[in-house]
Amino acid sequence: MYQKLSNAKNDEDLEDITDELLDRFGDVPKVTRNLIEIIRIRNKARQIGIDEIRQKGNSLMLGSKYGENNIKYSLTNEHLRDILTYINNVLDKILVTLKIKW
C-alpha cells in the first residue's frame, strides 16, 4: 500500500487508494489520512516547482532547495491547528494563479 501511495501522481490516484483502504479496512485512521494529504501536497508542490516546504516559528516557507522563488507566509494559531489544510489551500491558490490544472 505504501508503494501505491508513493506512486500516486494526482488526486484521482489518491482517491482510488483511499477507496481501496476503505473497502479493505473500514475507516481510514487520521494518521493515514494525514499521509495521503502530505502526498497530495507533495504532488501539487512539485507541479509548480516547489520542492521544499518548511515551518519556522510562525512562518511557512515554500521554495526550492536552490533558493529560487521562495515564498514566506505568516501563520496564525488557526493555521497551526490544521497546517496540512492550510498548505493545501495555499498551493491551490498558486495553481489557480498559474492556471495549472490539478
Image: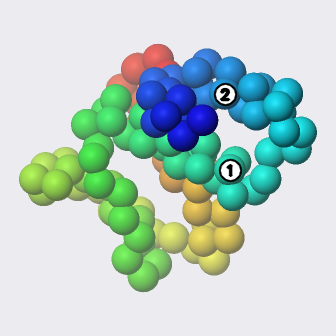
| Residue assigned mark 2 | 17
Residue type beneath disc 2 = Ile
Query: Which numbered disc covers residue 68?
Result: none
Determine whether 79 is above or below 2 in the image.
below
Judge left or right: residue 95 versus residue 29: left
Instruction: Classify 10 Å Cα crowding around label 1: few (below 14), some (14-19), many (20 and above).
Output: few
Determine whether 12 is above or below 69 in the image.
above
| Residue assigned mark 1 | 32
Determine whether 76 is above or below 31 in the image.
below
* x and y percentages locating residue 92 in the rendered image: 51, 36
Residue type beneath disc 1 = Thr
- For residue 55, say whether it is visible: yes
Residue 86, by quadrant, is: bottom right
Judge left or right: residue 49 versus residue 86: left
Looking at the rendered structure, the secondary structure element under dot 2 is: helix
Looking at the rendered structure, the secondary structure element under dot 1 is: helix
